Image (spheres, rainbow, N blue to C red):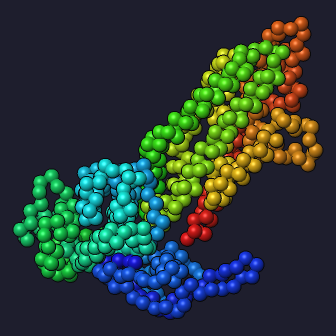
Amino acid sequence: MSIKVEGIDITFKQLTCKAKTGIFKRTEKNILDCISGTFRAGELSVILGPSGSGRTTLLNILSGLVQDHFQATLTIEASHYTSIRNQSSYIMQDQMLHPLLTVAEAMDFAIQLKSGTTNNNKVQRRHKCDAILKQLGLTDLGDTMTENLSGGERKRLSIAVELVNDPSILFLDEPTTGLDSYSSSKFVAYLSELARSAEGKCIYQGSNDKLLAFLNELNLSCPESFNPADYLMEIATNQYGHLNYALTEKINNGLDDSYRKEMYLPNVNQCATQTKIWKYKSTFVEQLLLLIQRNLLLMKRNRKYLFLRFSVSITLAIVTGISFYNLGHLANHIFDNYKFIYSTTQFLTYSSFYSLMIRFPIDLSILRREHFNRWYSSSSYYLALTIADMPALLGVTIVFISISYYMTGQPIEHQRIILMFVVGILISFTAQAFGLLASSIFSDVTISLVIGAGLMAVHMIFCGILVLKKDVQPWLKWIFDITFLNHGNDGMVLALFGYNREKLDCDRIYCHYAEPKEFLKLIDAPSSISFHSFFIILLIVHSFTYINMMIKLKKIN
């Protein structure tokens, strides 16, 4: 189904699309077989056909979601076919919305991301949000959580968030699926009204300075303290009656340029025409800040998950503290302290590894829609996802280390405490990156969990505690260098026993490892903490994750 507005027609001739099927014997199958058609501006056009007839494939091609594996002659009233993405929005069949946002919040984030924030203050956004919600019958649901909406209301909200930047073309894939006959009829009525409300006419062209004079000549008075542009938009949507015809006639459907402001250029020959169409209305920084804000809000609303993360951290920190209680200063318990380090790195690894591992596959469908419809770039999404989880990740790490460090009687020296925190945070960040990598490779959450557990098992084997680097075969030593847990364990060992720590207490007749340096020799500990290894591993893992995410988006498309 597609709605065309603002005078843009789409014509396709002899469109053919083929797909390869089969695992061992690959054969080609026609999904679309030499079809032709036209969608005209201002009409609500419906594509009918049984399941598997190629309706979604046709919409994917016309919307630009699929740009290969088809042959056709496409005629679009735009400068280039690729520019259709800048003039349209595609509401897919499996349209996903963030369940923990209210209707008003979902609209506000959509307006800021799709329209930019420079010339879009809070009052203007509110007026635009109210106008669209009124048009789609969602006015009374502004404070309702998306998860509490009915099927028809969610369908209308999915349209509302795409209307905020006034797309010329709106594609909808099976918009009435899952709705009863009454809801379907009402929903189609909203779509019909939406198609008719966009009449494809010009009601004004000119400068902002002359807009009020233009309206006054038609006895239309803009209220004081009201943005004239917003007032004009409300007129365009028939909120004051059907006045568009009068405005169109006065401006001669855009031919009258007497209300334009004259511009004087010092040297015409040196002025180049700007032809580039910007893909996003908001800048990268605006996208990043808005996505961080949205992710933090979603995290705040998901209180059960936050409570669980911190409860587990506190509980296991206390259990670890009791298990190794007040042994940190005793030389005869130095191997118990070594176990304490191992327990700490293991908890930080697993708690961080799964922090975003499940979130990423769930977000993929939302990312697919919002990225394709030009809300934001994939890089701003990925960066915001990791940054927004930092407060919780840091909190869990600091809470666990603080409690367990104190209960186990480790030395109260600022340098050693800071090093423990720094190494622990680096372990958490790196483990989180590996979790994202596992989830980016496999779409199925269950498979990601299984593969992720296997990946962490490899890190446990080569972490430098169960098997020492000096004891393995030479051809296996390189694995220790790329295992972040090995660097993490070495870092915590040095934080507790390195850097010229004084002689440990001994409550026996003789303690062989009373001097910490003797223990460091035994385990073949390095002389300094390898911070640069963490950053190199982080960079490589995040790079691979981002590349996998882009490949997965392309495959889905």
Q: Which image quarter: residue 420?
A: top right
Residue positioned most to the front: 181
Residue 245 image point, x, y percent: 15, 78
Instruction: Indicate left or right for 342 with 66 as reference.
Output: right
Residue 531 image point, x, y percent: 71, 37
Task: Look at 20% across and 80% down and name the residue there.
Answer: 253
Instruction: Indicate left or right for 359 with 507 as reference.
Output: left
How many marks are shown on the rendered structure?
A: 0
> Relative to residue 399, is residue 537 depicted above or below?
below
Q: Which image quarter: residue 440?
A: bottom right
Q: Nearer the viewer, residue 427 or 332?
A: 332
Q: Nearer the viewer, residue 310 or 367?
A: 310
Task: Look at 46% across and 91% down and name the residue there.
Answer: 36
Quadrant where the C terminus is found in the figure: bottom right
Task: Look at 6% across and 68% down and name the residue there.
Answer: 219
> Relative to residue 30, is residue 302 depicted above or below?
above
Task: Look at 55% across and 36% down and name the residue there.
Answer: 308
**Does any portion of residue 539 appear in the rendered image?**
no
Residue 499 image point, x, y percent: 76, 22
> Relative to residue 52, is residue 102 depicted above or below?
above
Residue 314 image point, x, y percent: 59, 28
Q: Nearer the viewer, residue 542 or 170?
A: 170
**Does any portion of residue 143 appear in the rendered image?**
yes
Quadrant where the N terminus is found in the figure: bottom left
Instruction: Indicate left or right for 459 with 542 as reference.
Output: right
> Relative to residue 461, is residue 30 depicted above or below?
below
